[in-house]
Image: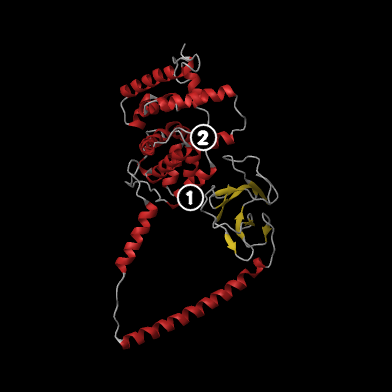
Amino acid sequence: MSEPDSPRWLDEIGDELRQEVPVRAAWRTRLLEDVARARRPVAGDDFDDRNDELPMIPTASVETAVAASRRRERVIVLHPLAGIAAAVVFIALGVGATLTALSWHARTLADSSTVTGKTPRPGTTLASNAPADREVVRFELSAPTASRVTLVGSFNEWNPVATPLQRDSSTGKWIVSLRLPPGRHVYAFVVDGDVKADPTAPRAADDDFGSANSVVLVGGRAS
Amino acid sequence: MTDATLVRRVLDGDTAAFTMLVDRHAAACTRFAMRMLGNREDAEDALQDSFLRAYRSLARYEERQAFRTWLFQILVNRCRTAAVRRQRRQRMFLVDDNAVASASVQPAAESTELRAELRRAIDALDPDQREAFLLKHVELLSYDEMAEATGVGVSALKMRVKRACDRMQWLLREVSDVGT
């Protein structure tokens, strides 16, 4: 009923027009991506663009950046001796940075050898140094032609930018490992903006927004 | 958890709380935008714009007002802007293919015909009448809430709703026996 004394035909029309219109998962994903990139609101600030026209961010920002970089161009003229001295300093800095990087890389390889030595399946746990009640779960998706893959799920509030996957160029697989608490976790991949279920995992019965989701159980018990 | 609590959580740095607000209000906002603009593409643009503006301006929200009304205030404006743009493009009302495809049950032919006539009738209303009609009889806002959302006085809104009802009744008379 829209009004206590409204005619029946009006109630019927209201009921008909009140039929739910589906919210597209792709739209929701795009919105949450934009929200994640947007200026974060803070209590007490005066920012208010509810009724303003939005600036044309994509093209304007590119043009502004190009213009700014052009404005920053400066011609520096060096005396020949000063130039030689500057070159020596740059070479010394470069050698130092290279040595530091090599040292860091060697340490990283040593630290990660315990994980990379394993061959986990998607949705299974890795031996890890995670907190006692959490387990490391590896998610992977074969998407050789994708340019961006992220993971959304109940563990990251379905935030499409919070958990990007890294591409393994040798296999075309996208991979990420997360520490998850025990229980049932529903998730999906976002492949170039499209939500896709994990083809190697069970489907969730409670698909949201008409898109298919997958399920992983951590610790062998569902929550 | 109330909308006001979620807003406070967002302002305290919990961005995920905004996701809950989106999930709570997206369906009604989508319905309104679709009915106002007549096609999903324009509606989703208006919705995207509305929710983003709401997020960025969230510190301006005052708890004395229902969050839904505050959100509709933004959405109504965005739909008005989109409608102006659409007029420029001279786009006609389209059936939402996505919604039809995702419907789990094929509606009866009679229901489909009535729905199509309803859509045509809604689309035939003047934009200000359509806006008032949808807010009143579909989204079920009170006249005070409508006044907040639209910036239009209660008396003028009542007049718009009445004219919209009269016109709807006239437009639909040939389809069925509504109003008799």
Near mark 1 (Cα within 10 A), the count class, few <14, some 14-19 or many ≥20, is some
Q: Position of residue B164 (x, y in %)?
A: 39, 21
Residue at the (69%, 60%) spot, across then down: A120
Name the image quarter holding residue A166. Answer: bottom right
Say whether residue B131 is left or right of residue A161.
left
Q: Please state the horizontal and vertical placement of residue A99, each as a whole percent of the image.
A: 51, 80
Report the number of discs: 2
**Chain where mark 2 sits:** B
B52 shown above or below B32: below
Front label number (1 vs 2): 2
Q: How is the image coloured?
A: secondary structure
* Position of residue A161 measured from the top left corner of the image (x, y, whole percent): 51, 53
Q: Is residue B165 above or below residue B66?
A: above
Q: Marks 1 and 2, how far apart in space?
A: 25 Å
Determine the residue located farthest toward the bottom in the rendered image: A81
For the residue marked with disc 2, what is the amino acid?
A: Asp
Which residue occupies the foreground of this view, B40 or A87? B40
Q: Which residue is mark 2?
A: B96
Circle 1: residue type: Glu
Mark linked to residue B29: none
Give me the residue at 36% from left, 87% from top: A84
Name the chain letter of the residue that bears numbered label 1. A
Q: Please tell me which residue lies in front, B29 or A220.
A: B29
What mark, if any, has residue A33 been given in the picture?
1
Visible residue check, residue B1: no
**Where is B103 relative to A26, above or below?**
above
- The 10 Å Cα crowd at callout 2, few under 14, some 14 to 19, many 20 or more, is some
Label 2 residue SS: loop
Helix, strand or loop for disc 1: helix
